[in-house]
């Protein structure tokens, strides 16, 4: 098996597990009556899960498949890929949640509309324009896509730091083994 197929096989499964932890966390919030529509607390928990998941997944890949040695660029690619797969998994879950729960979509639209009205207050934008913008941009597909894009973007930023922590060359590996 070549390095690329090993990389994808090994990291896709772990990335999906990270995404499932995002979905499980969101579902627990939903079932306990907490809003999952634009919830900063939920976003922070998922962000923490992203950091921990990328670190653990990258470390696991380095130690188990690369014999404890990984370059910065390969660590960055690994972490970014893990988060991308997790984000796609969570995006599918998000689409299904908003598609199957009309009241959830209504809550999201209400929050979004309120934010738009506050943002555009005093700018002369008509109520009709804001309503059209809300209706056109607040579909389950758009919400899921925005979740995917946001998670990948934020995950990449964290991956820049995590890759620096994970990178390890042969000399560092020998030093760690001697300790």
Image (spheres, rainbow, N blue to C red):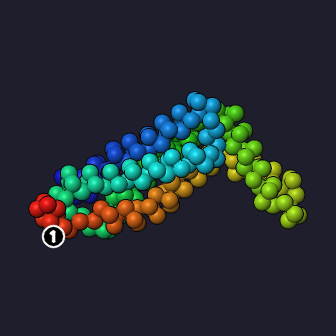
Quadrant including the C terminus? bottom left
Residue 102 coordinates in the image, percent (x, y): 68, 33
Residue 22 coordinates in the image, percent (x, y): 48, 43
For the residue pair 106 and 154, the one nearer the viewer reads as 154
Residue beneath the point at 58% across and 29% down: 31
Residue 134 seen by the camera: no
The image shows a total of numbered marks equal to: 1
Q: In this view, does 95 lie above or below 53?
A: above
Judge the density around disc 1: few (<14), some (14-19), many (≥20) Cα neighbours within 10 Å.
few
Residue 138 seen by the camera: yes
Residue beneath the point at 78% across and 50% down: 114
Residue beneath the point at 19% across and 59% down: 68
Residue 150 coordinates in the image, percent (x, y): 55, 56
Q: In this view, does 19 lie above or below 63?
A: above
For the residue pair 7 and 52, the one nearer the viewer reads as 52
Answer with the quarter of the image where residue 160 lies. Answer: bottom left
- Horizontally, residue 63 falls left or right of residue 156, namely left
- Horizontally, residue 73 falls left or right of residue 142, namely left
As drawn, the residue found furthest toward the front would be: 179
**What secondary structure is found at the residue carrying circle 1?**
helix
Residue beneath the point at 78% across and 60% down: 119
Q: Give the residue pinned by disc 1.
A: 171
């Amino acid at each position: 098996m070549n390095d690329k197929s090993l990389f994808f096989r090994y990291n896709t499964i772990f990335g999906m597990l990270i995404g499932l932890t995002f979905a499980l966390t969101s579902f627990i919030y939903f079932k306990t009556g907490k809003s999952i529509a634009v919830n900063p607390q939920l976003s922070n928990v998922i962000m923490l899960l992203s950091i921990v998941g990328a670190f653990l997944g990258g470390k696991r890949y380095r130690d188990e498949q690369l014999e404890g040695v990984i370059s910065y660029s390969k660590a960055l690619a690994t972490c970014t890929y893990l988060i991308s797969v997790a984000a796609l998994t969570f995006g599918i879950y998000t689409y299904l949640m908003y598609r199957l729960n009309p009241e959830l979509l209504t809550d999201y639209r209400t929050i979004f509309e309120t934010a738009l009205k506050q943002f555009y207050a005093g700018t002369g934008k008509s109520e009709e324009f804001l309503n059209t913008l809300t209706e056109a941009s607040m579909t389950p597909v758009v919400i899921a896509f925005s979740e995917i894009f946001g998670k990948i973007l934020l995950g990449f930023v964290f991956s820049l730091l995590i890759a620096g922590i994970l990178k390890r060359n042969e000399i560092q590996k020998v030093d760690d083994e001697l300790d």
